[in-house]
Image (spheres, grey):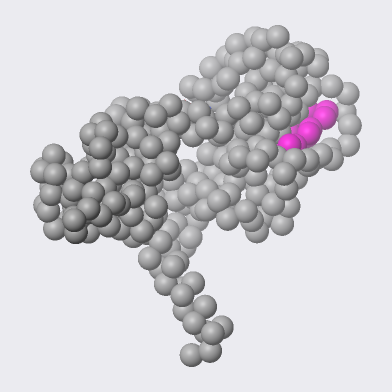
Amino acid sequence: MSSLEDQAFGLLNTYSNGFMVSQVLFAACELGVFDLLAEAREPLDSAVVAARLGASCHGTELLLDACVTLKLLRVDTRRGKAFYGNTELSSTYLTTASPTTQRNMLLYLARTTYHCWAHLAEAVREGRSQYLKAFGVPSEELFTAIYRSEDERLQFMRGLQDVWGVDGRSVLSAFDLSSFPVICDLGGDFFKDPLPEADLYILARILHDWTDEKCAHLLERVYRACKPGGGVLVVEGLLDADGRGPLTAQLWSLNMLVQTEGRERTPAQYCELLGAAGFGTVCCRRTRGLYHAVLATRGPPAPCFPEVSGAF
Ligand SMILES: C[S@@+](CC[C@H](N)C(=O)[O-])C[C@H]1O[C@@H](n2cnc3c(N)ncnc32)[C@H](O)[C@@H]1O
């Protein structure tokens, strides 16, 4: 094989084993490996970890060593015996007690999203969510259609909060919002319920759940609720202008296909939706994080040119 073929074959294997990497991370979280090592305050050998987790010695050793290679754990060898501890990454993001923990989101991905992705080919073929198929949820249960149970809904909400805890600051500082004294973060049944009075509405990680038609309906409702000079801040992961990157936003878009009715969008697509709902000015700002901000205000009609600034 030429070195080019070697590289291509290596890349292919990295991609095909990608789900196994996720599962190592998910299993270690589910079993409580990172919390156990954080609470132990000293590195532990695999037999002790296995005993405290109530898991098999053989399986635990394999999992811990895979975590070491993935830099999720570190290992010190003393007199031929391996002792495992958390790395900075796992201490920061994978232990329950860390203020920046992502554990809830990882558990949601493991318990819900992963199962929907097993049906990706069918989702592409049918062009619709596989949630009902993955979990056998009766389709008449419309509102709970993306949550199997209250536990799952809470797990998802905690997961969203985990990500927001790390990424929220950069989104909320993308624009100076000081001219909006009353800000309302919309949730619940915003398609039907009257919207509370506010100067600025936030639609965070909501439009990507819905079709263009439902987004148009929701944005028209928000526009009608806005005072002149008021507006809406849309928080979403943005696709590049041609829709072919960044990879995270593309994967989220496929995730919206397998789990919801929606998709991720480009700045121009948000601009079009917001402009059609009546918003006069629309400004789009990318942050250095996963989520970005689109601010639209109710004012005199103006041409809709998204201003894209920031790290990209
Ligand atoms: C992805 S969550 C985003 C929550 C929050 N804005 C955030 O960023 O963390 C979607 C929100 O849409 C609301 N929602 C409205 N109609 C819904 C429906 N039919 N199914 C699920 N969620 C719905 C839920 O209350 C939930 O708060």
In the rendered structure, the answer to whether residue 214 lies left or right of residue 136 reads right
**Residue lying farthest to the bottom in this orientation:** 1
The front one of 133 and 149 is: 149
Q: Is residue 28 visible?
A: yes
Which residue lies at the image location 68% right of the left edge and 26% below the top edge? 173
Residue at image x 83%, y 28%?
280
**Which span is picked out in magenta?**
273-285
Q: Is residue 176 left or right of residue 74?
A: right
Residue 25 seen anywhere in this rendered image of the structure:
no
Where does the image place residue 34, in percent across and percent down from the top left? 30, 40
Q: Residue at x 68, y 33 (%)?
A: 293
Q: Nearer the viewer, residue 261 or 253?
A: 253
Residue 104 located left or right of residue 222:
left
Would residue 231 appear left or right of 300 to someone viewing this image?
Answer: left
Q: Position of residue 288 (x, y in %)?
A: 65, 40
Image: 42 above or below 180: below
How many numbered discs? Answer: 0
Residue beneath the point at 65% across and 59% down: 244
Q: Position of residue 264 (x, y in %)?
A: 59, 46
Query: Is 101 located above or below residue 120 in the figure?
Result: above
Residue 98 belongs to magenta span: no
- The residue lying furthest to the front in this view is 79
Which image quadrant is residue 180 in? top right
Q: Position of residue 222 (x, y in %)?
A: 66, 22
